[in-house]
Amino acid sequence: MNLNELTITGIHEGLKKKEFSALELCKVYLDKLKEKDKEISAFLTITENLALSQAKKIDDVIQKDREIPHLAGIPLAVKDNILVEGVKCTAASKILENYIAPYDATVIKKLKEQDAVILGKTNLDEFAMGSSTENSAFGSTKNPADLTRVSGGSSGGSAAAVAANLCIFALGSDTGGSIRQPASFCGVVGLKPTYGAVSRYGLIAFASSLDQIGPITKTVEDCKIVFNAIKGKDPMDSTSVESKVSNLKFQISSLRIGVPKEYFVKGMSPEVEKVMEEAIKKYEEMGAKISEISLPHTEYALPCYYIIAPSEASANLARYDGIKYGYSTASKKQKTTNNLLDVYLQSREEGFGAEVRRRIMLGTYVLSAGYYEAYYLRAQKVRTLIKEDFDKAFEKVDVIFTPVSSTPAFKLGEKIEDPLAMYLSDIFTASINLAGLPAISIPVGKVKNLPVGFQIIGKPFEENTILETGEIFEKTYVDSSSITTN
Amino acid sequence: MINKEEVKHIAKLARLGLTEKEIAKFQKELSSILDYIGKLKEVDISEVEPTSHSILVENVMRDDYPNPVEARIQQTAGKQSPKLLKLAPDTKNGYLKVKPIF
């Protein structure tokens, strides 16, 4: 049995039947991680001692023949913008290079209550700003399918770690596509839950009205298990909501799938388009009803996103001031640091990387006197129109299918010098965050050896429907790489 | 294209130190991004209300009595302070120490 290729339920059964111990399992993963991560650089911190002590604790429980939670002993990785008490949390930024998390994020607390085993913290674009993980202050993560290509971003480390079998699942965060796009590039499952479905307490804030934590897994079934473990209302996050679980039985024959015509336009790679068409055809064969729909404001979603997200980021990142924590020139005995303003200017100049500075500048500009109405307020109104497009579409269909990205994983270095080209990577994903909807990326095929995912978008708090919709594809076409184009 | 003075003004508002070279770089980059997001000017928004929060949530009211959840939060917060102070670059007698304002 290859312990590195099991799913959550497989491991749970193995542990219960004592086929292997949690400690054995944990050691297998740690060894593989140390060896294999040299190639892909998915991890920033390995929490070996924490993992080993968690694993031993579960073995004690199993020895006494007591029931264990579903996630007990399951090795996982956590994006390095989610706090794990006592462990460094850098957000892949020099400004937090030595920051030790003083408490657990709510999602971590929930996973620890189930005795899941935390192997380490994964790489990301600095403060989750980027689409390739190349904006990390600590080096980029490579795509396990092709080491010359990006893993996607910003949760590139998490997606690559799952794809390379270095953990069973990982947590990511998604502000404009940061779970779904790397999941698509690496060939794994990634869920961005409805805004509010999962507590953001302990997530390092980027754009607070868009950020959500979600699972990155190997299968849809695993995704369901992890989502159910981390969701729910949290007194520490006033925007979190207890989602109602619908009792409706899922039936593919009564599923109405909408395909928005605006998402299949010029500029999309013909191979990706072909994979998408094949996937849609397969759903039709399974009995779903496919219809073309229109989301007329699609082309405005990305410009809208690149006003709202940097605006919120510029406010959120004001807290990194060289006074309370993080990188600071105040503690250095520099002669040029004479007063408080110098500390602010220098700490932020030296601590933040290029993309973060760019977004702080952009956000500050569009919020500054004289521009607020022209940019920010206008963007908020366009956001309403984008949301209404989805509301109208969901009167006629149950789920919406779109590509996750117009191309498979691009080459390392290809877009890093051109910020606008990099921003366009989020073109199919950012609108979903603006509307607050749940969406999942499912591996559906390959172009040459590169994975391609497709996106299933659902109504608010109907994660179950999109998970079931994805699972039926996975179960019917066991080999998820069944659609291949050259 | 935005001018150098604007870039400097924005950097000052954002408390972000910039080198001369970066000022020129930001002038170019911000201008091209602003051109792109300027696309929103095409949209008719005359009758549209702004959205700041995508999911409908309402304020939750409660009676004013000691709330066990809040009490717990405050308790842990009390225990946190030495941990939090340790993260600061400079402290004195349990306070954050900062440089003079002038």
Image: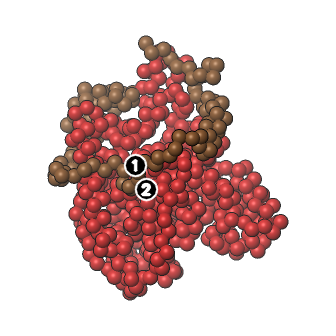
Q: Secondary structure at mark 1?
A: loop
Q: Chain of mark 1?
A: A
**Residue A365, numbered circle:** none
Q: Residue at x 34, y 26 (%)?
A: B12
**Pick the front one: A438 or A414:** A438
Residue bearing mark 1: A209
> A389 left or right of A437?
left
Kindly indicate whether the residue at mark 1 contacts the one at mark 2 (C-beta within 8 angstroms): yes
Q: Chain of mark 2?
A: A
Of the chain colours in the picture, the one used for chain B is brown
Q: Quadrant of the C terminus of chain A?
A: bottom left
Residue bearing mark 2: A195
Where residue A333 appears, as percent x and y from the top left, is 55, 18
Total number of numbered discs in the rendering: 2
Where residue A188 appears, as percent x and y from the top left, is 50, 67
User: Within the image, what quadrant is residue A19 found in?
Assistant: bottom right
Q: Secondary structure at mark 2?
A: loop
From this viewpoint, is residue A123 visible?
Answer: no
Q: Residue at x 59, y 40 (%)?
A: B66
**Pick the front one: B63 or A115:** B63
Q: Residue at x 67, y 49 (%)?
A: A47
Q: Is residue B70 above or below residue A288?
A: above
Q: Residue at x 40, y 85 (%)?
A: A253
Of the chain colours in the picture, the one used for chain A is red
From this viewpoint, is residue A231 visible?
Answer: yes
**Same chain for marks 2 and 1?**
yes
Q: Quadrant of the N terminus of chain A?
A: bottom right
Where residue A62 appears, as percent x and y from the top left, is 79, 66
**Pick the front one: A259 or A425:** A259
Q: Earlier in the sequence, mark 2 or mark 1?
A: 2
Q: Is residue A418 above or below residue A454?
A: above
**Looking at the picture, which amino acid does disc 2 mark?**
Tyr
